[in-house]
Amino acid sequence: MTKHDHIIEVKDLYRYFDDIKAVDGVSMDIERGSVVVVIGPSGSGKSTLLRCINHLETPTSGEIWIDGEKITHAAKQINEIRAEIGMVFQLFNLFPHLTAMENVTLAQKVVRGRSKEEAGTIAMEQLQRVGIPEKADAYPANLSGGQQQRVAIARALAMNPKIMLFDEPTSALDPEMIKEVLDVMLDLAQEGMTMVCVSHEMGFVRSAADEVVFMDFGKVVEHTTPDGLFNNPQHDRTKLFLSQILEH
Amino acid sequence: MAEQHQILDPIIPIDDLSSKRSLRDLPWWLVAILLIAVYAFYVMTSNENYNEAFIFIKSGFIITVKTTLISFSIAILFGLFAGLGRISKNLVINNLARLYVELIRGIPILVLIFFIALVGVPVLVDGLNNFGFWLYDRGIGILGKLFTAITNQDISMNARAIISLAVTYGAYLAEIFRAGIQSIVKGQTEAARSLGMSYAQAMRYVILPQAIRNVLPALGNDFVAMVKDSSLVSVLAVRDITQVARLYAGSTFRFRESYVTLAVMYLTVTVLLSILVQFVERRLKTHD
């Protein structure tokens, strides 16, 4: 195993909130360029796991390695490491006092030290990539949920991340807006971006995922392929969960 | 910010459809104040005694404005840093900020003004002088001279008044800034940090711009309050309008003319400022 095979390595990760074991001993390796979708019932620890990967959440114990660098207990370089990991949130978390354009350029200027012109050019490219260059001067309040989420994706992509994390990116969206966000994510997956997504969009799992992780009570119950998940689930808990979400 | 032009409600709403309702909605208190102002203006221009009082008291106006503006500007700095300190995870900083806020808020402003001007400043000057002598002893006389040269007389009562008000209001504003920062949802910090920004960068570019916008009305109210509290510096014989009015009343025995004029002057300034604050508040609301 060379270190470059696995861009993310999670080793024996625990995250407790007082008595609640949100993440209870998770280990997984994620290959460069692969798309991993984490599914599971609410409260199963999937979001906490994702947030541990870019250290928004400090693990109680265990290690996380990003591209051969240990990020747990590396407080000093954490900002540099985070800049390499894009994150998209359920509630978009756009900066409401800034236009779409400014949302995408801010961190480029402040963190990457890019000039205003350079950041602007890159921002425009990214807004084009997510399909809303015409909204560059709009404030988040004047954008639909789907548009806001696409700006949020552009904001993360403008930092040229090695990894993109998606924390239920479509859960807060109206049904007709889900597709526009998923299309952007599909394009990204096809371009070879390493993606870790917490999502229940089974269509996305089918068409884009390389691996699926099913979590329950903070533990990985099943780590398999989409084909294995839909056609040959190994555990009763997985079968029950699938039957519940695929029923409708 | 948005391109569409918002038509702001006038301060006194006029409703064409139902004149009954518009009469009820009229802010009668404001009408009363305007009437008082008009009447006072009339009296001050027509009545010789009032006119004289006004012209005399007016001479303190610059000091009142200067004291308020400078103190408030410094107080904003103190408040911002203390407010940031109050939410700091660093135990020392957090407790120091808390100590400052609680200490100041537990003492009346009048007492604080006496204390800071007549105890705090002299103690500080003593300390600086001693530090200067200490530098002398270490053979750094050039630096030491800087500190030993300061005397109590160098710090005017005007300056002490400004320091006192700034220190006092800094503690009040700290709580406003703290509340403003805490009103910004956690997701904003997380989004900023996830992009690689440091805590300070996230604060400066993402949290504070939003927080300050949210607390502008509260800051405005405190500014109006400070205009009024600036009258307390008259106890240090600073010649603001209150002190000048006292002097005028004392020398002419025209108490009524002095204090009516003084009250009307404060009222005019504070009401105008309050209307301005309301206007800003409305503008912010329409843009949300």
Image: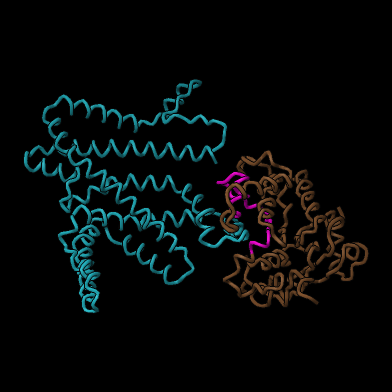
Q: Which chain is brown?
A: A
* Res B3 quadrant in image: top right
Q: Which residues are magenta?
A: A82-108
Residue B37 versus residue A44 in the image, above or below: above
* Res B144 quadrant in image: bottom left
Judge from the rendering whether residue A248 lies leftward or rightward of residue A198; answer left or right.
right
Judge from the rendering whether residue B139 lies leftward or rightward of residue A38; answer left or right.
left
Give the residue at x 48% y 47%.
B213
Give the residue at x 58% y 53%.
A109
Residue B58 versus residue B200 in the image, above or below: above
Q: Residue B97 in the image: x percent, y percent?
A: 39, 65
Judge from the rendering whether residue B158 lies leftward or rightward of residue A111; answer left or right.
left
Q: Residue B102 in the image: x percent, y percent?
A: 35, 63
* Residue B127 in view of the camera: no
> Chain B appears in which tint?
cyan
Q: Is residue B116 magenta?
A: no
Q: Residue A144 in the image: x percent, y percent?
A: 68, 42
Q: Is residue A102 magenta?
A: yes
Q: Residue A88 in the image: x percent, y percent?
A: 69, 56
Work out which quarter of the rendered image holds the N terminus of chain A and state it.
bottom right
Give the residue at x 73% y 73%.
A10
